[in-house]
Image (spheres, grey):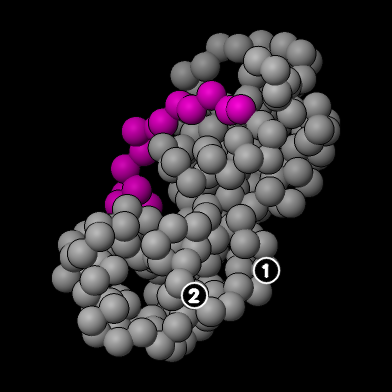
Amino acid sequence: MTAGVRFVLASASPGRRSTLTAAGLRPDVVVSAVDEDAYTASTVVGLVAALAKAKAAAVFDTLTDPELLVVGCDSMLELDGEPMGKPATPEQAVERWRRMRGRTGWLHSGHHVISRINGVVDATTAVATTEVVFANIDDAEVEAYVATGEPLRVAGAFTIDGLGGAYVTTVCGDPHNVVGISLPLLRRMFAEHGVAWHTLWADPTT
């Protein structure tokens, strides 16, 4: 990691953390107390951007590290122009999958980066979008998948890196974004803050 710079992920998502870890980064995790239901926007893209910004800002404001890089993220599936975060109940997850199966949706992930480098605070926001085509699974498959509990823990009620991977036929765009964090986008955002991606690689011997 860049000497003296603390890298913080403002997210409780194990998928985001494991994606960053697999890419060689070891972020500290500090979860915000942002009430997601309090935010609205006219578009799904606008909503995930607003939530990512709120989460990153809430965590950044609690930290006093002189050299700091904080990333906040939020992901939602868009289907028929509607935002789909985590389903609230198994029944809602079943209904969503009955709508999603055999169709195409768009997974949007908002990213907000706040840095304090050499005494200068800077912030940038961007959204990555990945097209996702779902398999036309039958009712028994829907109910079996929902019964595992996995769809209740993730935006859009599906994964590509877990049990749901068999039910996604095509991904057009960054696959990491479907997990909740776009590595290529984040690399570009870090560069805008003067931090080269490779300088954040952790020492594999530690």
Relative image position of residue 81 (x, y in whole percent) = 45, 79
To which quarter of the image does residue 148 belong?
A: bottom left
Q: Is residue 131 above or below residue 199?
A: below
Dot 1 falls on a residue whose secondary structure is loop
Whether residue 201 appears in this view of the structure is yes
Q: Is residue 152 left or right of residue 178?
A: left
Check disc 2 and report the residue beneath it: 168
Marks 1 and 2 sit apart, C-alpha to C-alpha, by 14 Å
For the image, the number of numbered tags is 2
The stretch drawn in magenta includes residue 28 = yes
The C terminus lies in quadrant:
top right
Relative image position of residue 155 (x, y in whole percent) = 40, 59
For image coordinates 59% across by 57% down, the residue present is 177
Check disc 1 and report the residue beneath it: 173
Q: Tell me the crowding category of disc 1: few under 14, some 14 to 19, or many 20 or more residues within 10 angstroms, Cα based.
A: some
Find the magenta span and give its range: 26-41
